[in-house]
Amino acid sequence: MNSSFVFCSAAFFRFACGVLALGLTLSAPLRAASSWDGKAPVEYVLTVDTDRPDALYHKGETVTFNIALQHNQQPATEGTVDWVISKDGVVPPIAKGTATLVDGKASVTGTLDEPGFLRCDATFKQDKTSFTAPAAAAIDPTEIKPSMPVPDDFDAFWAEKKKALAAIPINAKMTPVPVPPVYATAGPLEAFDVQADCIGNPASGYYARPAGAKPKSCPALLYVEGAGIRSAEVGVAARMAGKGFLAIDLNAHGLPNGKPREFYDALMNGELKDYKTHGRESRDTYYFLGMFLREIRAIDFLTSQPEWDGHTLIVQGVSQGGGQAIAAAGLDPRVSFMACGFPALCDHTGMVAGRIAGWPKMVPLGADGKPDPAALETARYFDCVNLASRIKVPCYFWIGFVDSITPPTCSYAAYNAVTSKKEIVNGPAYGHGRDAPNFWPTFNQVVITEAAAERAAAKETTSSP
């Protein structure tokens, strides 16, 4: 692992050859994390980076964090910066102090003797304003292990839930909706609001397809949404339908789509407030059970469409959607490829191993600092580290080293659990970086390229004597 961008599988290598220059372009300006958002001009800009561009180290190696402060686009002539070095940004500080700037620069060092992420958070104070910037170093990240083992009855539990779902007819209802004109330029498209019966709330979303597509001619894409309470977006499905896909943007909560914002706000502030912890006392009542089953039901719908090519079914998502993508690929063998960005729902039980837990931090700690036993047990059945271990198809991950929402330690625990072909993009200066430059074009192109590769492979298999 000697690059900020690590490409591991043959499938992605075909794509990587075409965009390697893009990858190098991305890594250079994003080496240092900054206090500036790159928008409105500011007087002070604080940055922190590591002494290695890829921010990759081995256990026990010294990591040098370089701190820089600019004042009106010039090195600050004087000042001090407070700094804290920790594991994952939350485990008690390994070291902390105050550095005096010389020509606007200072350096501090730290080490970590276990696989994980060593993080430096720097703070500069001017009058009543504080400027902060982080950096993180990956310490043998491919050696990060699950914080707890997979439960013995993990597969039996999910087999039972899937059997119960299969007993419910899909009963899909498709209501035509307009295609946003911006997406219709690629050719005529059709879009629908889809509601399919499920356990609990229906599988709800927007479905789009190329108009007049021939039977068995289209790959399928399931896009799963990030955290929050909102409608699915017809544009998300239409964008990929314009690339030849049968595509669904799945509503994470099984809600009606296209309602006024006030409808979703009322749910967010009412019955779905803090949904991420609802029912965590039992694996049979935890909120994400319904969410994961709705993914399977959406796959039921996609694979029942006569236009589906019968072999390519890609699931893609970011943040909460990234965790859902891992879950879908781990639970449903019809998935042929999984792409996740900054995945949540990983390593819920991290505190057991003395490290950070992933979003949504569903396991509360008691006054004694110990995890709640019921929630801890539930978490193991919904941990995407465990679900990742069941994936049999190629996977693509994108992570940020200074992501404090879906921490890289948790994402790497899931990535390492995958035993099939896989690839990962390391963003040394990315936080929860869905808005990072070129993220979406690259992330979507991976899906398009994979579908083309699978189509070519299927054609070659069919034509072989």
Image (cartoon, rainbow, N blue to C red):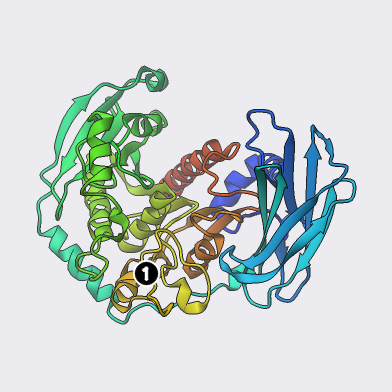
The residue closer to the viewer here, 452 or 83, is: 83
Vertical position of residue 452 compared to residue 419: above or below? above
Q: Could you tell me if residue 139 is visible in this image? A: yes
List the residue tagged with mark 1. Answer: 364
Percent across and percent down for residue 26 are 67, 42
Q: Amino acid at mark 1?
A: Pro
At a point 24% along the width and 30% down the height, the residue shown is 258
* Horizontal relation, residue 56 to residue 141: left or right: right
* Horizontal relation, residue 374 to residue 236: left or right: left
Percent across and percent down for residue 141 are 61, 67
Q: Could you tell me if residue 32 is visible in this image? A: no
At a point 43% along the width and 77% down the height, the residue shown is 369
Vertical position of residue 346 compared to residue 104: above or below? below
Quadrant of image for the N terminus: bottom right
Q: Residues within 10 Å of mark 1 (few under 14, many from 20)?
A: some
The residue closer to the viewer here, 242 or 266, is: 266
Q: Secondary structure at mark 1?
A: loop
Percent across and percent down for residue 162 are 20, 63
Residue furthest to the front: 127
* Horizontal relation, residue 281 to residue 237: left or right: left
The residue closer to the viewer here, 192 or 68, is: 68
* Horizontal relation, residue 332 to residue 388: left or right: left
Percent across and percent down for residue 4 are 68, 53
Vertical position of residue 352 compared to residue 280: above or below? below
Name the quadrant containing residue 281. bottom left
Vertical position of residue 154 compared to residue 406: above or below? below
The residue closer to the viewer here, 324 or 465, is: 324
At a point 22% along the width and 30% down the height, the residue shown is 259
Residue furthest to the bottom: 152
At a point 42% along the width and 22% down the height, the residue shown is 186
